[in-house]
Image (cartoon, rainbow, N blue to C red):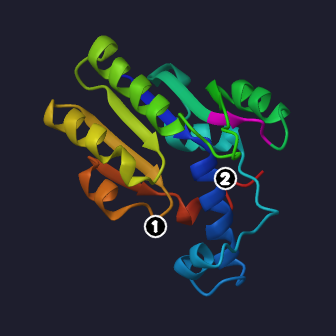
Amino acid sequence: MADCIYVDNSNVFIEGKRVSAVKLGLAPDIWDAFHYRILDNDYRMSFGKLYEFVAGQNRADTARAMLFGSRPPENDAIWDIAKRAGFEVVTHDRNVANKEKKIDTGLVAALTRDAYRNAKPGDIFTIVSGDNDYVPAVQQLREDGFQVDVVFWSHAGKELRETASNFISLDDHLDNLRV
């Protein structure tokens, strides 16, 4: 049995800043933080701590851990830090409007390829993101007998939480995941 992990870096990072803002009292709740774009810009998540939280301490149990992000980030060195933490980093350029593109579809492509080409009975696939855009892939994989867990902040899309084999909230681990 092995685990395969797929992380949407911007999604987990930005939403973590939102959760932290609520915890600090900068917003009364997550929905106000979202609506008014309130973030704790001092919050930084440790790639190593995220990897350990999702994968556990035995790296031999993890067949693959991929982190998807975009160029240019605020600091290109973050990709090296993610690699040292154990992630295979996949980056895509932002479009001319500086919006992320290809992250969700790249993650789904890797996830489904790994499931249908490399999976063995009992393997667990874990998505670290909260977008309902992942629901069709999760649904199809579950229908085909795969376990697909979602790890994200508690305000992840309701349909994604319900479609996943298991949903694990990061909210109670906000401070433990901090750099």
In the rendered image, which quarter is residue 43 located in?
bottom right
Give SS at disc 1.
loop
Residue 27: % across, % down: 66, 83
| Residue at figure coordinates x 68%, y 40% from the top left | 47
The residue most toward the top is: 117
Above or below 179: residue 73: above
Using residue 169 as the reference point, say whether residue 19 is left or right of it: right
Residue 169: % across, % down: 46, 59
Crowding around mark 1 (Cα neighbors within 10 Å: few <14, some 14 to 19, many 20+) is some
Residue pointed to by mark 1 = 155
- Find the magenta span and give its range: 69-73
Amino acid on which disc 2 is placed: Leu
Crowding around mark 2 (Cα neighbors within 10 Å: few <14, some 14 to 19, many 20+) is many
Using residue 3 as the reference point, say whether residue 101 is left or right of it: right
Q: Contact (CB < 8 A) between labels 1 and 2?
A: no
Seen from the viewer's position, the closer of residues 102 and 75 is 102
Residue 20: % across, % down: 68, 69
Give SS at disc 2.
loop
Q: CA distance from mark 1 to mark 2?
A: 17 Å
Magenta stretch prevailing secondary structure: strand
Above or below 77: residue 167: below
Nearest-to-viewer mark from 1 and 2? 1
Residue pointed to by mark 2 = 177
Amino acid on which disc 1 is placed: His
Seen from the viewer's position, the closer of residues 158 and 98 is 98
| Residue at figure coordinates x 56%, y 33% from the top left | 57
Above or below 171: residue 10: above
Above or below 123: residue 137: below
| Residue at figure coordinates x 33%, y 64% from the top left | 158
Whether residue 133 is visible here, answered yes or no, is: yes
